[in-house]
Image: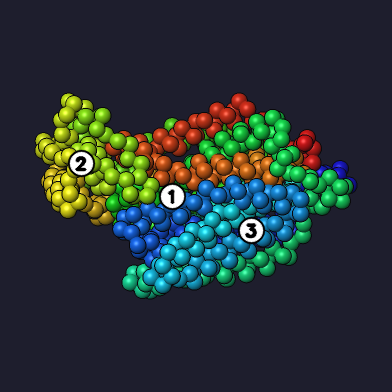
Amino acid sequence: MSIALGTERARSKGITSEQRKILIASSLGTVFEWYDFILFGSLAPIIAANFFTAVRPDIAFVFALLAFSAAYAVRPLGAVIFGRIGDMVGRKNTFIATVAVMGTATFLVGVLPTYATWGIAAPILLLCLRFVQGVSLGGESGGAVTYVSEYAPNDQRGFFTSFIQCMAPAGVLLSLIVVIGLRLWLGEAAFAEWGWRLPFLFSLVLLVISVWIRTTLDESPVFKKMKAEGKISKAPLTEAFGSWRNIRTAIAALLVIAATSVISQVGLVYGLLFLSQTLKLPPFTVNVLVGLAIAISLPFYPLVGRLSDRIGRKPLVIFGCLLAAATYFPIVKAITHFANPAYERALATAPVVLVANPKECSIQFNPTGTAKFLSSCDIAKELLARGGINYAQEDAAEGAVAKIKIGNVEIPSFEGRGLPAERLKAQVDALRKSVGEAATKAGYPQQANVDEANLPMVFVLLVVLALYGVIPFAPVSAVLVELFPTRIRYTAMSVPSHLGNGWIGGFMTPASFAIVAASGNIYFGMWYPIFWALLGAAVYFFFVPETRGRDLEDIPS
């Protein structure tokens, strides 16, 4: 039976009706789950306004982003929980459960009373639902990939699993379409008041469709065979990470998936925020450009997956990582040139310099928005960071008050320690006004001029960034399933996958913008994805074998 099954999978060239059904069911469930998961981030400002109204608006937004990121943090927990169930009970029922849990949690966000109605219970319950979403996603993608890979022919596994890989950007695209469509249909006022609930409520429809489709599927043939032979693991977590060989493989897999994840995140999220927050293009314009770029990238996932079945996973993943690392800086600088040429001219003709004693400058890590930075250097740095102003830093003598130089204009900061709150606020407002006037006079635009921007070239560059994510990300799931044996595959691949995706890839955007805030250079955030891309490429080259064409039943435990 084993030989017959392996031969059938190895020789299959076309996609049978059963395989097509499996791909559609697994892919639709995954795209719906990613839609649910990413929707929260798309609506973070509105979430902040409805659930964190007890604090200042800027701090409320921080809390909303922290609630969004919390789901990334618990994804590995979901991998452990659902991975164990998937290896002991079965693939099919487990990933039916994950999509049901995700859809239910998302629907409940849409009906959850706000802070004005339930007080502190509202944000607490919101955070709980967000945790549930993160745990659910921790079990979903590993389950879908495992299930599909165990139906795929050995020589088409990269092609089959690439459909699951493209569902994350498809989910992002679906959320953008729904949110943009509702904003246009209802208008901003109605959408902000009550219309924001509709995308969450819509998840109930997606939930019903996903569960119905997945209940029509059969269990993976590889798992059924293993169960019939009595080879199911009784302790998949212990087996998966109880030996140094498996731990070493898991660490290597984690670093490879981290590299591919951060490259994917640059194309899906970073470009959007860089254009809207730093270069200040209108949000609607940015959403349309990024959405179209993602849409164009989707068909390339199966193409790259099929290519990996022919030339191998290793060349594509390493090439994609190195290509991104080598070209990120020129691409992001080109985006600035085409999206906001006035800002680029101001950077060249009137550079901003912060002159300060480095001993007075703190690392402004302030996730809750409650920390106080009151030295003259810190006040100036926080003001420049909030304004999205690129600056260099020069050392000043000890005891000197920091000052901001914009072209030929010098604006002194002030010491905030010991000042009463009202006076501190008044002086910060005055300093902000002075810096804003000097920046405007030096040519720094308050908003990007869309008429002056070259939007077609911006779009081309966004497509390039999206395609960069495709090259290493499309075949990486095939790599993961081909590294671990069947009896522990769900657990063994899901845990490193979600550590790399959730903790390193998921925090790519906030980490990149934190680097920008610390350095003052709007481009330095690219060092985060470049570092992980180079590390992932090196680890894959030296420590991970080529796995193309492996029979999943022949991988040793």
Check disc 1 and give the amino acid type.
Val
Q: Nearer the viewer, residue 245 or 257?
A: 245
Q: Amino acid at mark 2?
A: Arg
* Residue corresponding to mark 2: 417
- Image location of residue 34, percent across then percent down: 54, 57
Q: Nearer the viewer, residue 368 or 340?
A: 368
| Crowding at mark 1 (Cα within 10 Å: few <14, some 14-19, many 20+) | some
**Disc 3/disc 2 C-alpha distance (Å):** 51 Å
Residue drawn at point x = 66 percent, y = 33 percent: 247
* Residue 415, percent from left and from top: 17, 39
Q: Which mark is residue 269?
A: 1
Q: Earlier in the sequence, mark 3 or mark 2?
A: 3
* Position in image of residue 478 (x %, y %): 66, 42
Q: Is residue 65 left or right of residue 490?
A: left
Residue for point 26% across, 29% down: 359
Q: Residue at x 58, y 64 (%)?
A: 103
First along the sequence among labels 1 and 3: 3
27 lies left or right of 126: right
- Label 3: how many residues lie within 10 Å, few (<14), some (14-19) or many (20+)? many
**Viewer-side label of 1, 3:** 3
Above or below residue 521? Residue 100 is below
**Marks 1/2: CA–CA distance:** 38 Å
What label sits on residue 369 in the rendered view? none
Relative to residue 21, is residue 390 drawn left or right? Answer: left
Q: Which residue is mark 3?
A: 98
* Amino acid found under the numbered disc labelled 3: Thr
